[in-house]
Amino acid sequence: MPETVGPGARLVIVGGGGFRVPLVYRALADGPFAGLVSDVVLLDARPERAHAIARVLDAVPLHGEHPAPSVRVEDRLEDALQDADIVFAAVRSGGAEGRVLDERVALSAGLLGQETVGAGGISYALRSIPDMMRVATAMRAVAPDAWLVNFTNPAGMVTEALAAVLGHRIIGICDSASGLVTRAARAARVDLRGTLAGVDYVGLNHLGWLRRLDDGGTDRLPALLDDPVRLAGFEEGRLFGPDLLRVLGSLPNEYLFYYYFHREALRSIGGADRTRGEILRDQQRDLYPRLLAADAPFAAWEAARRERESGYLAEARSEDEERDEADLAGGGYERVALQVMRALLTGRRAELILNVRNGQTFPGLPEEAVVEVPSTVDVNGARPLPAAPLTSHQLGLMSAVKAVERDTVQAAVHHDRDAALRAFAGHPLVDSFHAAARALAGYEEAFPALRASWV
């Protein structure tokens, strides 16, 4: 068994000016993950953002017994990666303006304007994959023994692309699947006791279904799906409604709203004054200067966090419906990332829903494809737990979207425009080759570097 890294590990956060970095730091400094890390290194394409977040970290209220990890900001990737044990990557290639263009170009072609789903997700991946390939290549040269925990979106595609460079030393994470399981288990009154042994969740990133919640030999999910009152008590139950859930016999990941209610989502997003990206851009336009100048930077950040999270998936809710307080309390992907890190560093085994290599999990998909399933993590990395066979509906949708993902990776890594056009045209949410061609042309105009990348 490989030697574990004890307390004093070095964590590098690529995208260290990211909005949710303080959630990671707070858990490392004052909670169950305290003591795992002694040094945190922040790197961001815009260094002033990393310095602003560093001010927030310095002001995080702490009450634990362990000394808080030191924090420093680096400007060069190679310098940041020196002596790294774990690398967290949460990069937004193109920034807030890039997200707005992902949304607006799709809408102008008559398509869904969402940053990770459909045409916008393909565009985002065509930018984020090359940026993250540079990170992976630098890691292999400077920190070959470090682990990359990736939550750069679209997480599944980025993880699959980077596995060609890093092999098993990359693990992709997303909090939407684990959040669904947590909320459904609470509604079904199932105590998971820190294990996923009774959980059957299958899918790809932002495309999955919870199919079983076993409580000591009894599957509690059917009773939950038959109870409109309990379904109304949590996010996904309200989002999809009892009729669809009865037909599916499962609980979909929230992002499947864009598939099962495509017309409604397109109408809602297309009719809004501003896209989600424009709202966030406007909210955060002066945030980082305020964080650099504020006497109480953590309080300023916390107020902005709550405002930001209250608008998540707003197109799926009525005007007077607000998100649950539990959803606004924070603590999503950072909990998953830190549990992965603890398992990798200490050997303390964890079971989590992760983006990992398919292998033989689903024979209908390529072995090297990345899927999002319950997995076990230890010092040797992450491996998928056994899963029941997919239904025809699940396999069909997953196969269609996975083909799009693989074409997108081909386009991004090998500068293949035909593969990009095939990805746009083949996506289930793109209903016309002409619309696909308009979208790709629109993204090439919006992002000149994309047009220049084709060979």
Image (spheres, rainbow, N blue to C red):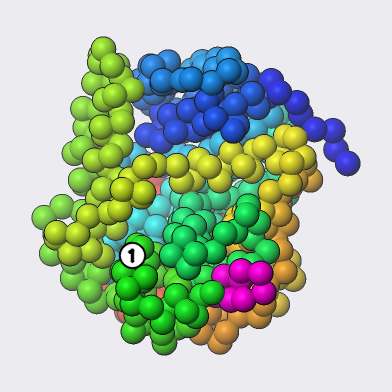
Task: Name the residue at 27% across, 61% down.
Answer: 113
Task: Say whether residue 254 is magenta.
Answer: no
Q: Position of residue 290 (x, y in %)?
A: 23, 21
Question: Is residue 202 shown above or below 377?
Answer: below
Quadrant in which the N terminus is drawn: top right
Question: Is residue 117 shown above or below 453?
Answer: below
Q: Looking at numbered disc 1 in the image, what kind of residue is underneath it?
A: Gly
Residue range in magenta is 211-219
Q: Nearer the viewer, residue 167 or 232?
A: 232
The answer to which quarter of the image holds residue 53 is top left
Q: Position of residue 283 (x, y in %)?
A: 21, 37
Task: Name the residue at 14% across, 60% down.
Answer: 319
User: What's the magenta bit mostly, secondary-structure-wise?
Assistant: strand
Task: Name the residue at 68% across, 64% down.
Answer: 197
The answer to which quarter of the image holds residue 5 is top right
Q: Nearer the viewer, residue 320 or 144?
A: 320
